[in-house]
Amino acid sequence: MTAKETPSTTRTSFWHDPEKRAIIFQLLALAVVLLVGYYLFANTTANLKRQNIASGFGFLGKEASFEIGESMISYSAADTYGRALLVGVLNTLKVSFIGIILTVILGTLVGIARLSSNWLISKIAAIYIEVLQDIPVLLQLFFWYGIFYQFFPPPRQAIRVLRGVFISNRGLVFAVPAPDPIHAWMGAAFLAACLGSYLLRRWARRRQEKTGRYFPVFRVSLLLLVLLPLLTWLAGGAPTKMDVPVLRGFNFVGGRNISPEFTALLLGLVLYTSAFVAEVVRAGIQAVSHGQTEAAMSLGLRPGQILNLVILPQAMRVIIPPLTSQMLNLTKNSSLAVAIGYPDFVSVTNTTINQTGQAMEGIALIMAVYLIFSLTTSVFMNWYNKKAKLVER
């Protein structure tokens, strides 16, 4: 090195530059992956052509020719495979969405109960967590599914729980309001109440930060959620006609039915996953310094206010990342529905594969759908995590 040269101006050879070397390694790895992918694709295409098996997604427009027991949209055997797969996607979304909501609520309650100063409540929560975590979720699905067919009678001997409410081995059947245009307006009023509750909560938080005065957001929001739809119903003439289930032949007609398959799947997923969520909540609460609780108590806050205003907001920063993983686990475990006959996306796709022989396309659709579900959940939870994290100055 000459006198004019400095370490900062000395040129490093290409191979000894870590950044350039890393780029070369990444390009080589990408090339290997592309070559392997091309080989697998070409080999699969050749094998399919040799066995005269058609490829492509043209089968989606053909008639499905099979029925689906549960559907959120109108469907018959004369519809296409594409519509049948859409029914499966909606069924998976239904059980996953309801299951996530119930799991978060139940897991939070059990996690808080696990830290209760009451010995009995704490031990019951601990037993709940240990037992349900140690039993495989598939066995839990079989257990709840078997209860319906083992302990409940057929529809002709259905148990009448209340007027218009029956339970049998075909599930729970209950009366619902008959279709009326005012119901759509009631739904819009409920959504408006949800938006109003959200805005009210933001206003109350800013008001409390400025003045220190507490506003009963929960009670006012609950009143809004009940009062707005009720006033809309009254303004629409207060229709009271009900669609009551009636026994005809070997099953009930009318009303709304919750099948044993859906109930067993929902119970199994919620109870199993909520045990893990409870441990996540417990760990998040214990991560908050006990001094925070003592400081809140010294200000005269009640236990419920301490939990809601001091502990949980700080614990959420610890809870959200592992909670996201449990949400994804619940969504992916819903594919076990095929074991108890619930027509989720995997079950419908398996039937489609058996009829069309399009195994590669079917598996690709399953992978794509669950990838979209997982990425959507992750994006939402990451957005919420950024809102909940501590902003440093």
Image (tube, rainbow, N blue to C red):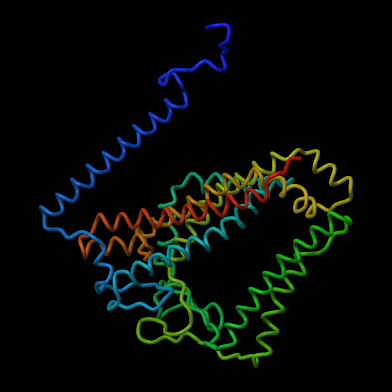
Outermost bottom residue: 237
Near-viewer residue (201 or 326) = 201
The answer to whether one can see residue 121 in this image is no
Instruction: Give left or right: position of 377 versus 291.
Output: left
Establish if 388 lies above or below 153: above
**Which residue shows up at 67% across the image and 80% down it?**
229
Q: Quadrant of residue 205?
A: bottom right
Near-viewer residue (361 or 349) = 361
Instruction: Give left or right: position of 52 versus 195.
Output: left
**x and y percentages locating residue 337 in the rendered image:** 39, 59
**Which residue shows up at 58% across the image and 6% down it?**
3
Outermost front residue: 4
Question: Across the whole image, how many numbered discs are drawn on residues?
Answer: 0
The answer to whether one can see residue 275 in this image is yes
The C terminus, quarter of image:
top right
**Which residue shows up at 35% across the image and 56% down it?**
366
Q: Quadrant of residue 262?
A: bottom left
**x and y percentages locating residue 320 in the rendered image:** 61, 47
**x and y percentages locating residue 120 in the rendered image:** 68, 48
Instruction: Give left or right: position of 129 versus 337.
Output: right
**Which residue shows up at 54% across the image and 52% down it?**
379
**x and y percentages locating residue 23 in the rendered image:** 42, 31
Establish if 218 lies above or below 173: above
